[in-house]
């Protein structure tokens, strides 16, 4: 049953990604985060890339399909929600086409729960994103997983808005 759900999500993501990627740019106001620019990768975590490109896409292009690099999660879950599948698919397609490129998937959790639980949950979230990427052709050696649990909050605060933004996986490209 789980395999069928994943296959259905991949099919939907494929259809969405092909609709968005035909022009090589995401549509303004398109699939994004409800947190404004939080998912665009412009502030958080680009470990660096020297303008790597494939199919006209660059990991440095702040308006391209690889600009969004944050996947948000619901409370106490490691399931990638359907609205974030196009982000995963865009990065998976890029990585599958560029075998020399690698990413670090950073798993994070909100402050609720013990530190040990949150480290485990952050890792499970990163593993979920990694699994989806591997199903789309990304090599095992292209992905590194790190969990910070609650230690690297994106937003300080003790309310649902802050917690929502802290439950995430960040996709960061690495230099070799």
Image (cartoon, rainbow, N blue to C red):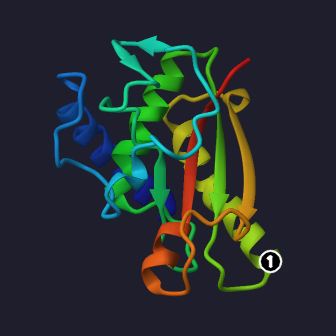
The answer to which image quadrant residue 123 occupies is bottom right
Q: Nearer the viewer, residue 134 or 160?
A: 160
Residue at (23, 35) in percent of width and height: 26
Q: Nearer the viewer, residue 131 or 123?
A: 123
Residue drawn at point x = 52 percent, y = 77 percent: 163
Task: From the top left corner, tell me how far across and down residue 39 is, in percent.
Answer: 41, 51
Q: Which residue is mark 1?
A: 115
Question: In the figure, 110 relative to 137: above or below?
Answer: below
Is the residue marked by circle 1 packed among few (<14), some (14-19), or many (20+) residues within 10 Å?
A: some
Residue 77, image x, y percentages: 55, 74
Left or right of 105 in this view: 52: left
Q: Residue 88 lies in what quarter of the image?
A: top left
Depth check: give the residue in front, 42 or 52.
Answer: 42
Above or below, 92 against 176 in this view is below
Number of residue marks? 1
Quarter holding the C terminus is: top right
Residue 90 appears in the figure: yes
Q: Position of residue 23 (x, y in %)?
A: 17, 22
> For the point 56% across and 49% down, which residue is it?
170
Q: Secondary structure at mark 1?
A: helix
Q: Is residue 30 above or below residue 141?
A: below
Q: Position of residue 152 (x, y in %)?
A: 68, 62
Residue at 40%, 42% in the rendered image: 68
Residue 127 visible, this angle: no
| Viewer-closest of 53 and 44 | 44
Q: In which quadrant of the rendered view does residue 174 lie? A: top right
Drawn side of residue 128 relative to residue 34, left or right: right
> Residue placed farthest to the right in the image?
116
Q: Is residue 20 left or right of residue 148?
A: left
């Amino acid at each position: 049953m789980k395999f069928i759900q994943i296959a259905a999500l991949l099919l939907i993501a494929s259809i969405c990604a092909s609709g968005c990627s035909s022009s090589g740019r995401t549509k303004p106001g398109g699939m994004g985060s409800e947190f404004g620019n939080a998912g665009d990768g412009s502030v958080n975590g680009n470990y660096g890339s020297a303008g790597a490109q494939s199919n006209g896409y660059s990991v440095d292009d702040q308006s391209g399909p690889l600009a969004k690099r944050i996947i948000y999660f619901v409370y106490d879950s490691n399931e990638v929600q359907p609205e974030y599948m196009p982000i995963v698919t865009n990065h998976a397609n890029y990585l599958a086409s560029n075998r020399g490129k690698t990413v670090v998937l950073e798993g994070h959790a909100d402050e609720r729960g013990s530190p040990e639980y949150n480290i485990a949950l952050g890792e499970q979230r990163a593993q979920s994103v990694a699994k989806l990427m591997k199903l789309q052709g990304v090599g095992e050696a292209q992905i590194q997983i790190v969990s910070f649990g609650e230690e690297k909050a994106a937003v300080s605060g003790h309310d649902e808005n802050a917690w929502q933004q802290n439950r995430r996986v960040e996709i960061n490209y690495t230099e070799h």
